[in-house]
Image (spheres, rainbow, N blue to C red):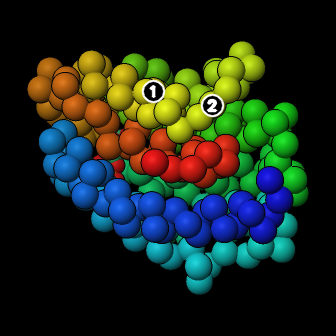
Amino acid sequence: MDVKEMKQRLLDLETTFSEKETVLTDLDRAIGDGDHGVNMLRGFKSLKDKIDDSSMASLFKTTGMALMSNIGGASGPLYGFSFVKMSNVVKDDIDNDNLKAVVTEFANAIAQRGKVQRNEKTMFDVVDRAREALENEETLTFEVLQQFATDTKVIEATKGRAAYFKKDSIGYVDPGAQSMVYILSALIGDDIK
Ligand code: ADP
Ligand code: MG
């Protein structure tokens, strides 16, 4: 995927987050404070005035900086920091090998910034399972990513706001896990359903 296509995919996430705003808000209302949909839309709306597409690295870096200052909440710094970190490994044409490196960097960045592990019911569950799937040469599709998010339902949250709900967080998909599905689908080049 070249810079032009990736830029378009990142800009198109504004439409995705506008269509999915209610879904994310409802999830965050159940086990959080109900702002995740608004947060993600605000972040991706800001991209069109902020991104520099002179190279893949600057595209990712400026995306990260825009997300960091515009998403807000706990997820803003996590997504923002991750895009800045991914800017260090992206190539101007992202092939399968580079995609592996990019998703690995994404997972490492979330782990580092969120001090989070698998099965704490966060966005990390989705990105780290995606990293593992690519490492095992499995095909990542929107449906596979969606299953990773759906699998967070059975987990009891131990990080972020959802952790205050303790056992009552069981039975709901984590909002950040769901938004991660949309972001990773854009990065891997599969259409968001
Ligand atoms: P806030 O919780 O501040 O309202 P958001 O609603 O925008 O922020 O984002 C909530 C999401 O952030 C959660 O669903 C979870 O996936 C993610 N999250 C929160 N804390 C962490 C953490 N320490 N590590 C990884 N992800 C986290
Ligand atoms: Mg919230």
Res. 128 mark: none
Q: Which residue is drawn at 61% across and 63% down?
A: 10
Q: Distance between the residues labelled 2 and 1?
A: 11 Å
Q: Give the numbered dot on residue 148.
A: 1
Question: Mark 2 or mark 1: which is in front?
Answer: 2
According to the picture, the residue beneath numbered tag 2 turns out to be 140
Amino acid tagged 2: Leu
169 relative position to 49: left or right: left
Q: Is residue 122 above or below residue 73?
A: above
Residue at the spot x=64%, y=22% of the render? 133
Give the residue type at disc 1: Phe
Residue 27 screen position, x and y as percent:
23, 44
For label 1, the SS is: helix
Nearest the eye: 193 or 140: 193
Q: Which of 156 and 144 is in front in this view?
A: 144
Q: Is mark 2 on a helix, strand or loop?
A: loop
| Residue 25 in which image quadrant | bottom left
For disc 1, does the CB lie below 8 Å from ligand 1? no
